[in-house]
Image (cartoon, rainbow, N blue to C red):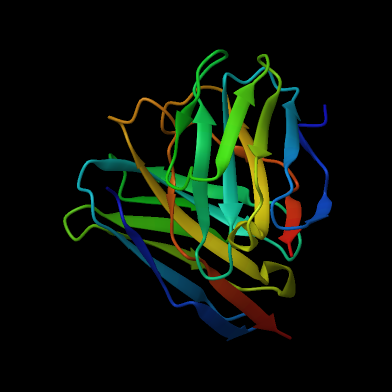
Amino acid sequence: GENVEQHPSTLSVQEGDSAVIKCTYSDSASNYFPWYKQELGKRPQLIIDIRSNVGEKKDQRIAVTLNKTAKHFSLHITETQPEDSAVYFCAASKRSDSWGKLQFGAGTQVVVTP
Amino acid sequence: NAGVTQTPKFQVLKTGQSMTLQCAQDMNHNSMYWYRQDPGMGLRLIYYSASEGTTDKGEVPNGYNVSRLNKREFSLRLESAAPSQTSVYFCASSDTGAPGNTIYFGEGSWLTVV
């Protein structure tokens, strides 16, 4: 089955700096890669996603890049703000799954210090 | 429009007791899911229901049963709770099970088994 590894497990950045989280996946058939943000005590919420036919997607200060050859994808947050502090999860799923099975990474705790 | 609602939010059980986590969505979604979240392990799928009347096992189904009562409701039952089932449980739903459909999570249920 699919295995998603996520690094780093914790990331501390100064406000205004950039943050990068990397994930690798094992199943070359995976073709959908969402990122979820979870604030302390809250539910995970989708912040951005990318499909395998696209190499990069951007939404304001966040962007995701995908390298299908190397089987890794990354989340980039620019000009970080204190409200970006949260746990971020990457996930992967594939077209052949008849249902929305997401294989999640273990998460990255991002702390933005003012 | 409340989205995905799950109850109870907090529960303490004794080993061997049973309980049911209730979940309802008001987005007319076809697919519903139960995940558990443990520290350092991301979210793991327990059971899912691709559509009303169908259920299937996810990654960690042992010790759990589910019922898709109707299109709106999907319950998770612990027949004989064990300390290893201490976790945060999230119900979720999506329009369909096809990859690429956003999965929306409930607020979570904190379960402690002593």
Q: Position of residue B41 (x, y in %)?
A: 50, 64
Which residue sits at x=59%, y=39%? B34
Total labels drawn: 0
Image-quadrant location for residue A78: bottom right
The quadrant of the picture occupied by the C terminus of chain A is bottom right
Image-quadrant location for residue B114: bottom right
Q: Nearer the viewer, residue A74 or A98?
A: A98
Task: From this view, report whether residue A41 is shown above or below residue B71.
Answer: below
Q: Nearer the viewer, residue B95 or A64?
A: B95
Which residue sits at x=73%, y=68%? A83
Furthest-left residue in this view: A69
In the displayed structure image, the side of residue A21 where residue B4 appears, left or right: right
Which residue sits at x=52%, y=36%? B47
Q: Nearer the viewer, residue A4 or A18?
A: A4
In the displayed structure image, the side of residue A89 where residue B92 appears, left or right: right
Q: Position of residue A11 (x, y in %)?
A: 54, 81
Q: Is residue A19 visible?
A: yes
Q: Is residue A59 visible?
A: no
Q: Position of residue A68 (x, y in %)?
A: 22, 52
Q: Position of residue B35 (x, y in %)?
A: 57, 46
Task: From this view, report whether residue B98 is shown above or below residue A57.
Answer: above
Task: From this view, report whether residue A46 is shown above or below residue B51.
Answer: below
